[in-house]
Each structure stands twice: as C-alpha cells, then as structure tokens.
C-alpha cells in the first residue's frame, strides 16, 4: 500500500508540474518538447507501476490520458488576432482628415528631412527644392503627424488629429526678403493636394497655411506662397475679383467698418480672433495672416477697404 501510494503521488506531482510548464509557455517549442518528454517519463512510471501490479498506478492511467490531451491542446498555436468578418461595410462613416495644412521648412532638404524624421516634429509629406522636386512621405495618412501644434480653424483645435501636413523646402524670410517657391514645387504640390483632397473629401476652405490656424505664432507658408495660382488650379478658397470691386466701391461710399465687424468676419471665414472690438496685437496678427493669404501685396495687419471687401466676398 505504501509503495502504491508513493507511485501515484509522484505521478500526480509530475503531471501537475508538466501542466504548469505548458501553461507558462504556450506555443513554445521548448515548452512543447519538455511536455512531451515529461509525458514520456510519466508513461514509464505508469508502466513500472503496472508491471509491479500496483493498483494505484492503474487508477492513475485515465488521469494521465486526460492530462496528455489537455497539454497537447495547450501546445497548439493560438490565433494572433481576433478573426473578423469584413463582408459588411457601414455607410455611416467618413475620413478623419478634414484639413490640409501647408508649411515652409526654413531649412534645406537635408536638414528638413533630419528634423522631420528624427525630431519631435513631423509632417505627412515633404516636397524638396530640387530642380525636379521629390515628394517624401514621412507619415502615413492614417496616422497623426506632429506638424500643427497649438491652433484653431473654424473652432476646431487639436488639428494634428484631423489634418494632413505638407512641408515645402523653402527658407522663408531671409532678412526682409521672402524666398520664392519654384514653379516645379508648386506644380507638384497642386497634384499632391488634388489627390489628398479627393481621397478625403477636403473642402476648399479647409486647405490652409500654418499661419491661418496659428496666426499668433506662425507665418508659414508666408506671403510669397502663390495661393492664387493654386486657386486657379481649383485648389483652395479664393474670391471673385468682380465681387471684390463691387464691395470696394460700396465701402468707399459707406466708410470703413469698425474693428468688431472685422473680428466677426474673420471668425466667419475660419480664423480664431478676439471679439472685443479693439485693434489689439492679437487682432493685428490675425489680420496680417489673412492678408498674407488673400492680399499678399500688403500684410500690415491694419483694417482697410480692400481687406474688408475681400472678407465680404469670401464664402
């Protein structure tokens, strides 16, 4: 009796240890081999007990068989992902992308690539300044690039989560001179924006510069950027010159609106601006950003009839 109990006890402890080892390393080759080795040992122990006529060893054999099945099932590779049925697609959805934001890099191509790929800022695309410009995709459109920072457009903040950022290699201002964008860069940019806007159904008024969304701290893409040329290619929002001329004539008769009118109109067309009726620094910065985009010949941030007429003509 003592010998039989000892054999059964040792067999049970071995089964329990093997089970614990298999559970600790599911799918592991080493775990699976160790389990099979243990089962082989258990079979030997069971056989010894059987040969010696031990009644307890005979009782352990069914438990051994069940443990073997459980261990072999545990060794099978579990699926790495939940199986999904994608045969039905909901109609009620749209892209996360609502805006396309343009920037200049203020550096050459090599420096821009390093900063945008290895630093704490990034963009989805970079257009180089080569004679035949190249487009780098640095961040997939399904992911957020860190390009927008603090800003707002039509009341929407956290623009990194809802925008595509495009950096264009351009030095920006050198002294008082803003550096031009090459025709080749602009042509390639138009093609790129057209494709992105079509993919995500981006509205014309949501194709903007960094300075439009962050007028208190940014000036890119600057007054040298050819927004009107993009508009002529069907990219972005622009105004009808005849409508502006009519509004200008009317304003010449009625007089310049007050500051609060400008603040309300700037808000209507997307800008974040105070609403207190005072021409403070914040309001001047917003007016300057608007003028750089729509009237780049003069962007002093001062209210004037032409700025008022353009504001009135924009939809």
Image (cartoon, grey):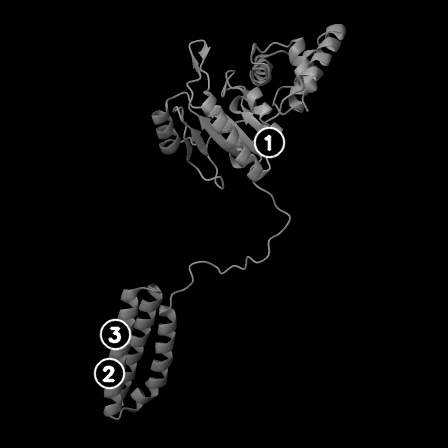
Q: Do the residues labelled 2 and 1 touch (CB within 8 Å)?
A: no
Per the rendering, the mark at residue 37 is 3
**Could you tell me residue 258's position as x and y percent?**
70, 11
Numbered tag placed on residue 213 in the rendering: none
Res 213 quadrant in image? top right
At label 1, counting other C-alpha atoms closer than 10 Å, the crowd grade (few under 14, some 14-19, many 20 or more) is: few
- In the picture provided, is 116 more to the left or to the right than 275? left
Upstream in sequence: badge 1 or badge 3: 3
The residue shown at (27%, 70%) is 33
Mark 2 Cα within 10 Å, few/some/many (few <14, many 20+)?
few
- Which one is nearer the viewer's eye here, 31 or 6? 31
Residue 271 against residue 135 in the figure, above or below: above
Counting residues from the N terminus, which is met first, the one under dot 2 or under dot 3? 3
Give the label, 2 or 1, closer to the camera. 1
Instruction: Estimate the spatial distance between the alpha carbons at disc 2 and disc 1, rounded to whole Å.
Output: 73 Å
Give the residue number, with chain letter if any, for mark 1: 156
Q: Which quadrant, please, contains the N terminus? A: bottom left
Q: Name the residue under label 2.
A: 44
Does dot 2 land on a helix, a strand or a loop? Answer: helix
Compare residues 76 and 97 and report the one nearer the observer: 97
């Amino acid at each position: 009796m003592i010998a039989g109990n000892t054999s059964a006890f040792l067999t049970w402890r071995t089964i329990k240890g093997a089970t614990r080892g298999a559970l600790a390393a599911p799918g592991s080759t080493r775990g699976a081999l160790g389990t099979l080795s243990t089962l082989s040992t258990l079979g030997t122990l069971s056989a010894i007990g059987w040969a010696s006529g031990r009644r307890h060893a005979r009782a352990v054999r069914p438990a051994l068989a069940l443990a073997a099945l459980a261990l072999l099932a545990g060794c099978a590779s579990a699926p790495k992902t939940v199986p999904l049925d994608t045969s039905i697609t909901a109609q009620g959805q749209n892209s996360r992308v609502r805006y396309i934001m343009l920037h200049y890099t203020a550096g050459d191509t090599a420096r821009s690539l390093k900063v945008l790929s290895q630093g704490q800022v990034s963009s989805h695309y970079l257009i180089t300044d080569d004679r035949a410009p190249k487009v780098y995709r640095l961040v997939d459109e399904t992911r957020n690039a860190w390009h927008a920072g603090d800003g707002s457009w039509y009341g929407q903040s956290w623009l990194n989560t809802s925008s595509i950022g495009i950096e264009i290699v351009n030095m920006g201002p050198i002294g008082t001179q803003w550096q031009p964008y090459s025709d080749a860069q602009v042509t390639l940019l138009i093609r790129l924006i057209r494709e992105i806007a079509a993919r995500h159904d981006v509205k014309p008024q949501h194709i903007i510069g960094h300075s439009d969304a962050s007028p208190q701290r940014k000036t890119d893409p600057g007054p040298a950027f050819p927004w009107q040329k993009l508009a002529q290619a069907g990219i972005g929002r622009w105004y009808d010159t005849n409508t502006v001329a009519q509004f200008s004539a009317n304003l010449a008769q009625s007089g310049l609106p007050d500051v609060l009118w400008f603040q309300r109109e700037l808000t209507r067309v997307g800008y974040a601006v105070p609403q207190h009726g005072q021409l403070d620094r914040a309001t001047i910065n917003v007016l300057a950003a608007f003028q750089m985009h729509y009237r780049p010949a003069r962007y002093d941030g001062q209210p004037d009839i032409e700025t008022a007429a353009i504001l009135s003509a924009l939809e």
